[in-house]
Amino acid sequence: MNKRIMASFLLLVMLIGIMDGCKKNIAAPELKTPASESVQGILAERKDIANITAMKGNVTGKVKCYYYNQFMDGLQYKVQLGEKVLKGQELVVADTEELESMLEDLNRELEEVKGKLSYQKEYSQLNQKRIKLQGQNADQKGKEEAQRELEKEKIDEEYQRSLLEIEIANINKQIAEVQEQIENCTLYAEEDGYVSYISYEESSLEFYNILAVTNTDSLCINAEYLVEDYIRAYVYYDGKEWELNEIPYSDMEKKAAERNGMTIGSKFELPAESMVLGDYLELYFVLEESRDAIVISKSCIYRSEDMDYVYRIHGENKEKCFIEKGIDDGSEVQITSGIEEGDLVFYPIDETIEYEGTAIVTKESVPIMGIERSCYLSYPYQSLVTTRIAESELQYLTEATELKKGDLIATVKVLRGEADVKEIENQISTLKKQYDIQNDMHEKVIKDLNEEIKKLKEKKKEQKNKSKGEKQENIDLDEEQEDLSKIEEQENGDGEPEEDSVSEEDISIKELELSMEKMSKAYEEDNYKIQLKGMEKKQKHLKESTGEVSIYSSEEVEFERFYVEKGSRLVDGSVLGIMHHTDTFFWAVRDGDNILPYGMKVVIKDADENEYEGEVIGTYPSGEATFTQTDESGTTFTYTVLANENQGNVYIRLKENIELKNGTLVYQSNMLEDAIVIDMSLLKKEKKDFYVWVLREGKPYKQYVQFDNLADDKLLIYKGLSENDTLLMGVK
C-alpha cells in the first residue's frame, strides 16, 4: 500500500522554554519501550506492571479562613492582599452601630428594672414596718387583720422580686449576647501569615469566608484532585524520586465537601526542603501494581460477547485464545490466564492509513506549566454609596469620577423625617406632662404628711406638758382618792390613753408613710430621666436625618454613578453608586481554571516588551468558591463565597511601583527534565482510551499512551512511548 509522505520532516517534541538559572529542574520518570519482537506479533513477556495516574500539584501554604457566624454588615478591612499579619492582629471589623444602640437600650432597660427592684424592696420593708406599728395599738381583731396584711405584703414582695430578678437575668443574658456579638464584629488573626484572599464585600452571610491567611512557614503539596485507594504516591524533583506522605482529610471534611459540591485535592507533606512556595510538580499515584506479570500490548486484545481474547500465532496460522486480564496501565495489560510467557501474540497493523510525516521522540526539558495572559490595573476594593433613610428624594449627585476625602457625593431631602421628629417630640412632651402631674401629686402628699406629722408632734408635746402639770401635788392623798383614781382609769380603758391622744407609734407610722412617698417620688423621677434620655437620643438621631442630608467621600476614591437622577425617590439601602478605593490596587489576571497559585513568581510585560517582576498575592476562584476547615473540636465547616466580578481574578503585586494600566503576564514554572513530550494534535481517542500512531519496521502501529496536560497544548507521556520512537504525523 502506497503511503503519501510529505517532504518536510517535523520534529514535534521540542523544548518549550528554557528557564533562567534560578529555576529548578525536575527529572521525569524513566519510560520503557513497549515490547515489539515482530511486525506481525509480539511476545508475551514477564515484567512489572503498574496502573499509574498523574496530575499536577503545587507547593502552597496552610490556609486559615475567616468568617462570621452570623450576618454582618458595614465590613471594614484592616489589612490588604499580600500583607504580612501577626497573630492577634485585627483583620476585619463589622459595623457595630446597631449593636451599640441595642446595647445602650438594654443597659437602660436594665437600669430601669434594677431601680424598680431596689425601690420595691425598700418600699415593701417600710410598708411592713408601718403595718406592724398599726397592729401594735389595735384590738385583737385589728391585730389579726394587720398580721394578714403583713403576710400578704411579704408574699407580694417576694413574688414581684422573683419576677424582676428573672427579668434582670434575661436582660443580662441579652446584654452578654450583644456584647459577644460586638466583640465578634472584629476578626483577629489566629496565626502569623500573609493575606491571600479578601472578598471585599461590605456584608457577609453566616459562615461565608471573607478573608484567608496563608501560613508560608507551614508548606504542603496540594494536588489538583482527590485521589483515594492508591498504593503509593511519588514525585520527581531535583533529579530524585520522592515518596509522598498524605495529609488526610477527615470523613467529616469529605462529606461536607461532597454535600456542597466542592472539589478538594489530596494534600501531602513537603518531602524536600528545597521545594518553595509556588512550585509546580508532576505527581504520580500508583493505583495497583504487580511484579513479574505476563504482559502484552492493549492493541492485541479483542472483545466479543463480554469475553476478551487474543490471537496466538503458530507459524502462518492464528489461534483464538480467550484470556483473563489483570492490571491495565493504559498502554499494556496483565494477562492472568489464556496465554503463557513467550507466546507470540498477533499485533494488528493498519497498512492503509495515510500520514504526512514522522518525528522522532526525544527526551526534553520542559516547564510543567507555562501561560501568557493579558492583565490590567484593578481596584478590587469597592463600596456602595447608599442612604440609611427610610424615604428621601435625591437633590444632587456628583458627576465627578475622581473624588478626594471630604468631597460631596450626594444630597437628599428627607421625606418622612419631619413627621418622625414631630412624633418623638409629642412623646417627650407627653412624658414630661405625665411626670409633672405625678410629681405634683407626690409633692402634695409629702406636704400633707409633713403637716400631719407636725400636728401630731405638737399634740404629743401638749400631752406631755399636760401630764407634767397634773402630777399629784399631794402625795398624801387618802386612800379613797386613790381608789377613785383607779376606778376612773379603768373606766377610761384600763389605763390606756384617750382616743384623741397621740402615741409615738402614730408619729412613726406617718413618718414611714412620708418616707414611702418620698421614695416613690425619687423612683419615678429616676425612671423619668432614664426614659427621657432614650427619647432625646432618638430625637437627636431623627433631627440629624431631617431636611437635607449630605453624603461625603470618606477617602480618595473613583466614583461610578448609577442611573439615578435628581428627584428620584430613595429608600433605606438605595444604591447611588460604587466607590472604587484607589489606594488599593493590583494587577489582575483572569484565572477561571485556577492555575495561578498563591506565591507564584511571574513577569508582566508592557507594550514595549519591558519586563517587571511580580508575585501572586491574591487568589479568587471563578464562580462559587467553597472553603472547608475543621476547628479544634473536630467540627467541620464548609463555607461558600458568592461570586462577584472580582472572583475570577488573580492579583499580582509588582516589585516596583510603575504606571502600567495594561500588560501581559508571562509565567513558566520549574522545569521537568528528561520528559517525553508530544503535541496534543497527535493524540487519538478510542472510547475511553487514548493512542498515537508509531512506525515500526516501516509499518504503522496503534500505541496506547498515558499522559498529563502541559502548557501550550503539549502532553507529558508517562506510559507508552520511549526515546527514539517514530511518531506518525497528520494521520488521516
Image (cartoon, rainbow, N blue to C red):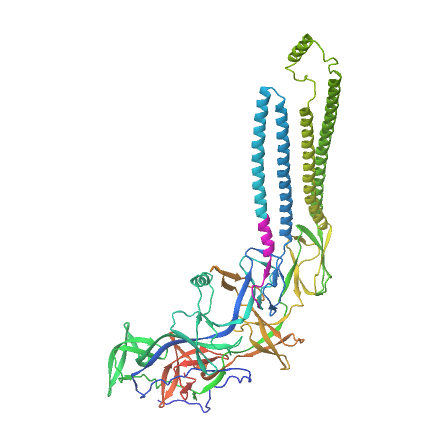
Task: Give yes or no for residue 184 being in the magenta stretch.
Answer: yes
Magenta segment includes 110: no
Q: In which quadrant of the rendered image does the C terminus lie? A: bottom left
In the image, taking residue 193 as reference, residue 232 lies left or right, namely left
**Residue 119 sits in quarter:** top right
Relative to 250, 289 lies left or right:
left
Depicted 617 relative to depicted 311: above or below: above
Residue segment shown in magenta? 175-192
Q: Can residue 539 be seen from the camera position used here?
A: yes
Image coordinates of residue 196 in percent, x first then y, are 57, 68
Q: Look at the picture and state if 236 lies above or below 384.
A: below
Residue 566 in percent (x, y) is at 71, 56
Q: Nearer the viewer, residue 181 or 496?
A: 496
- Looking at the rendering, which quadrant does residue 284 occupy? bottom left
Q: Is residue 511 left or right of residue 67?
A: right
Residue at left 71%, top 32%?
442
98 or 243: which is nearer to us?
243
Residue lying at the far bottom of the rendered structure: 7
Residue 12 visible to an observer of this rendering: no
Residue 58 on image: x %, y %: 50, 74
Which residue shows up at 67% across the image and 32% down it? 516
